[in-house]
Image (cartoon, rainbow, N blue to C red):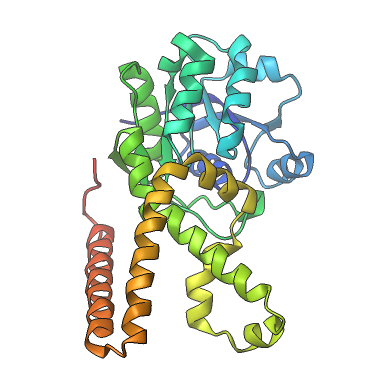
């Protein structure tokens, strides 16, 4: 389905929101994009970079005139954003988001928007960089990347089709989960890894000889901790928003660490190697699956 959206309101002009806007423009899928952000400097920079065409001066008018509203702000701000747009929301305007948690976002939509939550189609693009802000945005960021759409029972087919077509125009591959399935999956493969990376770097940074340790850290440390360069505010919000699922995964990981610790204490080389080999094989299989999916001509996951 080809799509052209005359007016888009982008709430949050950073990495993901900015990349969405640039991709839509590159594909001639968007007309006029209006930007809103807490940071005026970010808005001015987004305007300079061509991410947006206009900084919203009259917020009410920007909401009222929008065909699509993209909420690309930290998930803890979602309820407040919905509250601000509700009085001005046109019945034909479609809303989507880019949040890394979904159960809390859906709950906020239903509580604040009421019947108009039918206009909100939640989504989560699985694409990112450790850089933040408008300067980090790329028109190619979403090409070949997965976007999980957690459509709601009350969504209209028109709203869902609009959101799906917009992400496809950006080059993304669509997948579909319930909000609960989404949060369980990403607690394991996204939220826990971020927590671990932050914890490791913070632990080393607080040691008295931290400078010496960082002096000798090399590519393995850099690769493992890359995501600790992500936005602390955003990941604070994600951690708390998905606390129940994340705690389950953290407990499971802690048990794995305890098992490894006991193997080290017991000098149990075969057991250690067995755990490492399971991990190695699983990672090789995962990388092979990614490479197959990225080959030209392969289909997406929808």
Give coordinates of residue 272: x percent, y percent: 28, 83
Residue drawn at x 50%, y 54% as measured from the top left: 128
Residue drawn at x 46%, y 24% as measured from the top left: 107
Give coordinates of residue 168: x percent, y percent: 36, 39
Q: Nearer the viewer, residue 177 or 96?
A: 177
Residue drawn at x 59%, y 32% as measured from the top left: 10
| 57 relative to 10, above or below | above
Residue 126 appears in the picture as rendered: no
Q: Nearer the viewer, residue 209 or 191?
A: 209
Q: Is residue 254 left or right of residue 130?
A: left
Give coordinates of residue 42: x percent, y percent: 73, 44
- Asked where in the image residue 237 lies, by quadrant, the reply is top right
Q: Is residue 141 left or right of residue 203?
A: left
Quadrant of the image for the N terminus?
top left
Residue 44 appears in the picture as rendered: yes
- Asked where in the image residue 293 lies, by quadrant, the reply is bottom left
Q: Is residue 287 left or right of residue 95?
A: left
| 47 relative to 208, above or below | above
Quadrant of the image for the C terminus?
top left
Residue drawn at x 56%, y 20% as measured from the top left: 66
Numbered-mark total: 0
Q: Is residue 287 left or right of residue 247?
A: left
């Amino acid at each position: 389905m080809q799509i052209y959206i005359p007016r888009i309101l982008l709430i949050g002009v950073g990495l993901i929101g900015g990349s969405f806007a640039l991709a839509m423009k590159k594909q001639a899928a968007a007309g006029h994009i209006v930007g809103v952000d807490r940071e005026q400097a970010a808005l001015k920079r987004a305007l300079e970079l061509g991410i947006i065409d206009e900084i919203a001066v009259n917020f009410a008018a920007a909401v009222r005139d929008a065909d699509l509203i993209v909420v690309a702000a930290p998930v803890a701000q979602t309820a407040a954003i919905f509250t601000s747009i509700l009085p001005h929301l046109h019945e034909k305007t479609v809303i989507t988001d880019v949040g890394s948690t979904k159960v809390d976002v859906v709950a906020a939509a239903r509580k604040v928007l009421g019947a108009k939550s039918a206009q909100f189609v939640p989504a989560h693009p699985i694409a990112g960089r450790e850089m933040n802000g408008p300067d980090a945005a790329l028109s190619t960021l979403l090409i070949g990347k997965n976007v999980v759409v957690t459509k709601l029972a009350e969504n209209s087919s028109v709203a869902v089709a609009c959101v799906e077509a917009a992400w496809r125009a950006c080059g993304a591959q669509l997948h579909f989960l319930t909000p609960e399935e989404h949060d369980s999956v990403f607690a394991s493969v996204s939220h826990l890894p971020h927590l671990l990376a932050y914890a490791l770097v913070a632990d080393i940074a607080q040691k008295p000889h931290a400078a010496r340790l960082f002096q000798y850290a090399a590519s393995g440390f850099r690769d493992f901790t890359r995501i600790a360069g992500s936005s602390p505010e955003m990941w604070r919000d994600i951690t708390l928003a998905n606390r129940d699922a994340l705690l389950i995964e953290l407990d499971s990981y802690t048990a794995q660490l305890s098992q490894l610790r006991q193997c080290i204490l017991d000098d149990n080389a075969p057991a250690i190697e067995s755990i490492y080999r399971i991990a190695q094989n699983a990672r090789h299989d995962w990388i092979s699956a990614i490479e197959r999916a990225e080959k030209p001509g392969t289909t997406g996951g929808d």
